[in-house]
Amino acid sequence: MRNIAQDMEPHMLDDVGAPQWLINEASVRRDLSRLRPIDYIRW
């Protein structure tokens, strides 16, 4: 289920009745994968 969640947007996961912890985990992984090394330097 986690593998499928990585490919879905949070609102789609909510629509299919996924648990909140799975939606949160997928959102965090998606956000972290979008960060580039330059973003770490800014922080």
Image (spheres, rainbow, N blue to C red):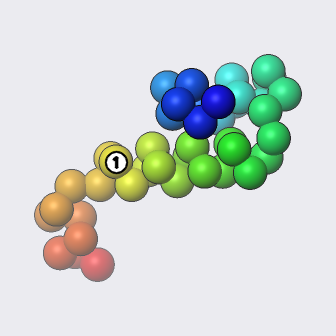
Residue 18 horizontal side relative to residue 10, left or right: right
Residue 34 horizontal side relative to residue 4, left or right: left
Q: Which residue is mark 1?
A: 33
Q: Position of residue 27 (x, y in %)?
A: 56, 46
Residue with the most extreme bottom position: 43
Q: Position of residue 23 (x, y in %)?
A: 68, 42
Residue 21 horizontal side relative to residue 8, left or right: right
Q: Position of residue 26 (x, y in %)?
A: 57, 43
| Residue 8 visible somewhere in the drawing | no
Residue 15 horizontal side relative to residue 3, left or right: right
| Element at label 1 | helix
| Residue 31 visible somewhere in the drawing | yes
Disc 1 residue type (three-letter): Ser
Q: Quadrant of the N terminus?
A: top right
Q: Which image quadrant for residue 32?
A: bottom left
Q: Which image quadrant for residue 8?
A: top right
| Label 1 neighbour load within 10 Å: few <14, some 14-19, many 20+ | few
Name which residue lies at 57% across and 25% down. Answer: 4
Q: Position of residue 2 (x, y in %)?
A: 59, 36
Name which residue lies at 79% across and 21% down. Answer: 16
In the picture shown, does residue 33 fall above or below 42?
above
**Between 43 and 9, the one nearer to me in the picture:** 9
Name which residue lies at 29% across and 78% down. Answer: 43
In the picture shown, does residue 8 fall above or below 27?
above
**Figure disc tally:** 1
In the picture shown, does residue 21 fall above or below 40?
above
